[in-house]
Amino acid sequence: MSQKIAATIDIAGQAARADLPGAGSRNPQDGFGNLLSGLMSGAMVIAAIMVLLYLIWGAIEWITSGGDKGKVEAARSKITTAVTGIIVLAATTAIFMIVQQLLGICVLSIGRGSC
């Protein structure tokens, strides 16, 4: 018969016991992880707003083009670029969520939910 052995590695605990810088912070709001999480969340919000504004800009240009082929094509290009940006932003968010689940970390939290 074979026996299965499970091992758990507590990296955070080992770092705190070794008194490494940044390990075992007394305030859970401190630390590089929380800073990175805030920066990533802010960057995603700013990117989403910029993509939405670019989409609206393209739509306004299309409406005000007056049938001019050059203006319509420029507006269509802006809209296509904005839609591509939305797809890239959604894919990036999905990849972050998958990596977080696989590694058991929290870098990016969406909405009110926590990781």
Image (cartoon, grey):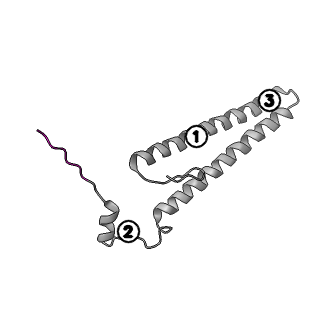
- In the picture, the disc for residue 72 is 3
Residue 95: x and y, percent?
49, 42
Distance from disc 1 to disc 2, alpha carbons, whole Å, reads 33 Å
Residue 82, picture quadrant: top right
Front position among marks 3 and 2: 2
Residue 13, picture quadrant: bottom left
Distance from disc 3 to disc 1, alpha carbons, whole Å, reads 27 Å
Vertical position of residue 62 compared to residue 54: above or below: above
**Mark 3 or mark 1, which has the lower sequence index?**
3
Q: Indicate the amino acid at tag 3.
A: Val
Q: Residues within 10 Å of mark 3 (few under 14, many from 20)?
A: some
**Left/right of residue 69 with respect to residue 14 in the rendered view:** right
Residue at x 63% of width, y 35% of height: 84
Residue at x 51% of width, y 59% of height: 36
**Left/right of residue 49 with respect to residue 63 in the rendered view:** left
Residue at x 38% of width, y 70% of height: 24
Q: Circle 2 sits in a helix, a strand or a loop, which is it?
A: loop
Q: Circle 3 sits in a helix, a strand or a loop, which is it?
A: helix
> Which portion, as a residue range, is magenta?
1-7
103 and 51: which is toward the camera: 103
Residue at x 43% of width, y 46% of height: 101
- The reply to whether callout 3 and callout 2 are in contact (CB within 8 Å) is no
Residue 3, picture quadrant: top left
In this figure, which residue is indicated by the disc labeled 2?
23
Front position among marks 3 and 1: 1
- In the picture, the disc for residue 90 is 1
Q: Indicate the amino acid at tag 1.
A: Ala
**Mark 3 or mark 2, which has the lower sequence index?**
2
**Mark count:** 3
Vertical position of residue 33 compared to residue 79: above or below: below
Distance from disc 3 to disc 2, alpha carbons, whole Å, reads 56 Å
